[in-house]
Image (tube, rainbow, N blue to C red):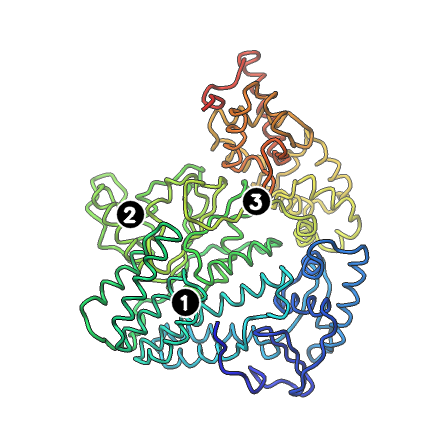
Amino acid sequence: MTRPPVRTGVPGAAGTAGAVHFSLLGPLTARRDGRELPLGPRKQRLVLATLLARPNTPVPVDVLTDAVWPDDPPRTARKNLQVYISAARALLGPGGDGGTDRLVHGCGGYLLRIAEGELDTLRFGSLARAGRAAAERGDLPGAARLLREALDLWEGPPLHDLRDSSGVADEADRLEARCLTVYEDWAEAETELGRAAVAVDGLRDLVERHPLRERLRAAWMNSLHQSGRQAESLAVYDDYRQLMARELGLEPSPAMAALYRSMLGRGREVRRPAAPRETPSRVTLPAGTGAFTGRREELRGLLDVLGCGEERVVVVSGPGGAGKSALAVRAAQLLADPFPDGRVHVRVRGEDGTARGRAEILAELGRWCGVAEARAEVPSGASAEVPASAGALAVLAEAWQEWQARHRALVVLDDVPDEASVRGLLPRSGKCAVLVTARGQLPGLAPVHRIALPPLADGEALELLGKLIGAGRLRTDPGAALRIVRACGGLPLAVEVSGMRLAVLRHLPLAEYADRLDDPSAALDELVAGDVSVRHRIASGWRDLADGDRWVLGRLAGLADDGCFTLDRATVALGCGERAAIRAVEALIDAGAVTSPAGEVTAHAALYEVPRLLCLFAREQGAAGQQEAAGDRTGAPAAALTPG
C-alpha cells in the first residue's frame, strides 16, 4: 500500500525511559530512547519477528523453527533457537514492576509479554477498534481521526526485509490485510463527512495492487463520485466488471451493481454523517468452555479471515468431538469489533440430533434481528414462533437477506447436517459473515473458505489434559499421559472426558488408565464421564451416514489395527472395482469419517485412515450386526458400490 506519513516518535502511550519499542509496520526495528538498536544476525531477527507477530500468545517451537529454517533445519536447530531466545531476553529486559521475564517458555511454546505502547501493531489494533466504535456511535469525525492515526503508524509493507521466510511472509500478509480493512473504514468515513477528495489517490493506488478487492473499489467509486468525477467513477465499475468476467467468469456482486445503478444519471451528492444506530449490538453466544486449549493456528486463521472481511462464509469441518463448536464460539467471542451489529449462535440440529426445519431456524433469526413483520397467520395447533405458510417463509427469508445486506453481523450456524439446511440462510451481499460448523465437509457449498480440524497435536492434547487434572499430576508420569492422549486419537472430546474422569478418580495412576484405553475392547467404555459419552457422540455421526456408507466404513475399519489403509487394500476388502472403491472412500472423506493426506497425492499412493475411536465403534457395530443377522449379509449394499 502507499506509504503514509513517516512517524517522528514512538506511538502509543509514553514509555519508561530506557524501554525498548518495536515496530513491525515496515522493516523490523527496535528503538530505545529514540535510538535504533542492532537486532543481530538475520536468523535472530526472524525469531524476534515471529514472536512479536504473536504478542502475548504462546508460539510453538516448530513455528519458530519453520520461520528460521523452512526447508531443512539442522540437527542443532533447537540449540540455536535457545541462543536466539537468550539474545532476545537480553534485548527485551525484565518486564513489569516485579522484574519478571518478558519471554517465558511453557508447554505451548515461547510467550512474549509486551504492552500496547511497546509494539506498533498493538497500538494499531487499539486505534482501529476505537475508530470503529466511534463510527458506531455516529461520531464520524472522531472515527476518521482515530483510523487515520492508526494508518499513520505504517512505514511501508510490513516486515518487508524478512519476507523471504514463508512463515514471516504469512504474518506480514495478515498485517497488510488488516491495514487494508482499516483503510477502507477510513475512506468510507471521510466520504460520509464530505471529504472524499482526501482518499481518492490512496484508494487508486490500493486498487491497482488489489484489483479484485470489491470493497476497495466501491470506496474508490464513491470517493470519485462525491468529488464530482462521475465519469471516472462509472469507468471504475466498468473496468471491474470486465476484470471479473475475464479473470473469474463472474459478474460484480448485487451490492456493487446497485451502487453503480445509483450513480447513473445523478450528479454529485455529498454524503452527511450517519445518525447513530437505533438498535444496540445483539449477542447470543453460549458460554465458552473453560478448558478450551490448542487450535491456535485454526483460531488465528478464523480471526484473520473473518476479521478482515475477506470471506462471507467459512466452513469448519471435523468429526464429532473435534471441538468445532468450541472453536467457532471462541472466534465469535473475539470478533466483536469487526461485527458491531451482533453475533448470534444458532444450532441447526435439535437436542435429539435431528435437523431443525428451515421455518424454525428462520423464525429464530428473524426474532434475533427484529424482523417480525414477515410472520404470517398461524393455523390452530401450530407453534406461534414458526411461520406456517410457504408465503410467510419466503417473505421471512427475503427479509433476512435484506437485513444481512444492510448490517455487519456474524452468524454461527452450528452442527449443520447438510448443504440444504443452510442454503438460503447464507448472505448474498453485504458485510455479514456466516461461520458454519459441520461433521462433513459440505462440498456442495461454494464459494466458501474451508478449515478442516485435524486431531490435536500431542503438545496441545497434553496441555488440555493438564488443564483438567493439574500440571503437577501430569508431570508424575509424562509417558503415561502421552499414551492417554494418543489412545484418544487426539480427539478433543475424548481427551476432555479422560481429564474429567481422572480428575474424579484421583487414586487412579495414569499408567493404569492408559492401559485401559490401549485395550480396544474397553477404550470406549472408559471414555464416559457422567452424562458425557464419547460413544454417544460417535454414534450420532454414525447415524448420519447412509446405510451403504456405514457398511463400507465397517469393512475399512477392519483392515488394520491402526485404521490405516491403501486403495488397493480397500478394493480387496470391499470386493469391488477400483473406481467403485475410490468413490466409496471419497464419500466417507466428504462425510468426515475418513481422513486423507493433506498434500496432493495420487489415489494409489495415498494412505487413508479411519480415526481410532471411530474405528473401534465401527468394529463394535460390525460385531453386533453379525450377531443379529449371522450370515445374512453376503455383499455390499448396491447403493454404496455401484460403478458410475
**Where is mark 3, residue-wise?**
322
- The quarter holding residue 123 reads bottom right
Of residue 356 and residue 125, the one placed in the foreground of this image is 125
- Cβ atoms at labels 3 and 1 below 8 Å apart: no
The amino acid marked with disc number 3 is Ala
Marks 1 and 2, how far apart at CA: 46 Å
Q: Is residue 29 left or right of residue 339?
A: right
Residue 470 visible in the snapshot: yes
Asked whether, in this view, residue 505 is left or right of residue 419, the answer is right
Q: Amino acid at mark 1?
A: Val
Mark 3 vs mark 1, CA separation in Å: 40 Å
| 448 to 233, vertically: above or below | above
Q: Which numbered marker is on residue 457?
A: none
* Pointer 1 local density, CA inside 10 Å: few below 14, some 14–19, many at least 20: many
Q: Quadrant of residue 433?
A: bottom left
Which residue occupies 32% across, 76% down?
Answer: 191
The tag on residue 207 is: 1
Q: What element does badge 2 sit on?
A: loop
